[in-house]
Amino acid sequence: MQSLLTLKEEKLKSKIKDLYFKDFNYFGDKIDFCITQNLGILGEINLLWAEAKNGKDSCIYESFIQLILTIGKHRYNTQQMPKFLGAFDAQKFAFLPYASIQEIFYQNDIDWSVTPSNHKTSQFLSLLTQLKPTLEKEIILFSYENQSKELSSFITSNLTTDEISKYEIDKNNFVSVYFKWVEVVKDTISIDWERAKQVGILDADFYLADLLSNENSTITDKLYTLLKGSYYEFNKKLTLLGTQSNEIASFKDSQKAHQKFWSIYQRPPREEFWSYIIERRDLLVAQDVRERKGAFFTPKIWVQKSQEYLAKALGEDWQEEYYIWDCAGGTGNLLSGLSNPRNIFCSTLDQADVDVIKERIKNGANLFENHIFQFDFLNDEFFDTTNASGGGGHNCF
């Protein structure tokens, strides 16, 4: 492999493609090295995105951070994501399962506008510090000189068309499958998406109805939209006008694209993933919609920290002495671990999220169903009245 050391980056990428990825499609643009496979109606499926460096002294960790910043800067994370990210130079090639770092793209405090190739920005260094433990644990590294056969075997075993054509959906890849569903299926559904979005009906709800289906019928009645064979039905218990009429949306193409799409993927996912997928519906909502609605996931560590702050400010008996109202509750993650449901209330903007919380209650969440309600705290009216029989507790908002 001595000859690789003298190659410029573009020549190196071409050589690595010929040596190890000759059976796949390749292109490079803002992401240096993209490996794909064509699967007919699904088009080019992304298998690997990699950062390339010439020479032999590149830092693999820094290359992965540069790649992640490139993906975020150009919003490639809103496309169908590859199974692996990669980083390589003239001496070594490293793989990183995309699922191990996918949550980074949903954090609110990352400045994706920085120049990815500038390794000295505070954002780059902060991201490197944050992700280094994951990189150390998850990276799969091969040396061309000593492990060339092992590298070829890994690629053959992990980037095969046969595997992708029998794609099993789980909690790590359901977002990537959603982005491909948007490309292939969304526009074949007979609905005005702009008008639908204005009243809170999102394409994500149709995808969930598809995903949590068996024999083309949604297997839970707790979703906002249900798939009923050859059409979708808005859950009549949740209709916007409060009526019992069945509102439906059919397919423009006699369901051809829908059927071909779901012939590629296995559904429903294993039941152990259902709760997570429903709770993480926020990952399927477009960034602009999430920002407008303030719909962001609350990690467990923030939940724990918020409760520590409440105890510090209000005293150790705060759960007994105060009423807690999460007025922008989303799917209720911020209320996890609270012990006194009598004093806990939660409202959220979308009815679909209300139903997610109520489904969690049926699965053991320590909340009262009649304390969960739909409410737009920025725009809906408040009434300054007090229920005198409500007891002597304080209010905590």
Image: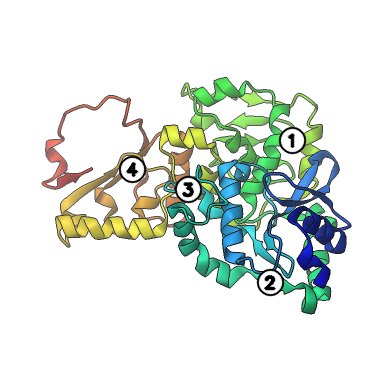
- The amino acid marked with disc number 4 is Cys
Provide residue 270's location: percent of width, then percent of height. 65, 58
Instruction: Name the residue that disc number 4 marks.
Output: 346
Instruction: Name the residue that disc number 2 marks.
Output: 141
Question: For the residue carrying disc 2, how many other residues have a C-alpha within 10 Å: few (<14), some (14-19), or many (20+)?
Answer: some
Left or right of residue 74: residue 168: right
- Give the quarter of the figure containing the N terminus: bottom right
Q: Residue at x 63, y 57 (%)?
A: 98
Which one is in front, 31 or 327?
A: 31
Q: Earlier in the sequence, mark 4 or mark 1?
A: 1
Q: Nearer the viewer, mark 4 or mark 1?
A: 1
Distance between the Cα atoms at labels 3 and 2? 43 Å
Provide residue 54's location: percent of width, then percent of height. 71, 61
- Give the quarter of the figure containing the C terminus: top left
Instruction: Name the residue that disc number 1 marks.
Output: 184
Determine whether label 4 and label 1 are within 8 Å by CB.
no
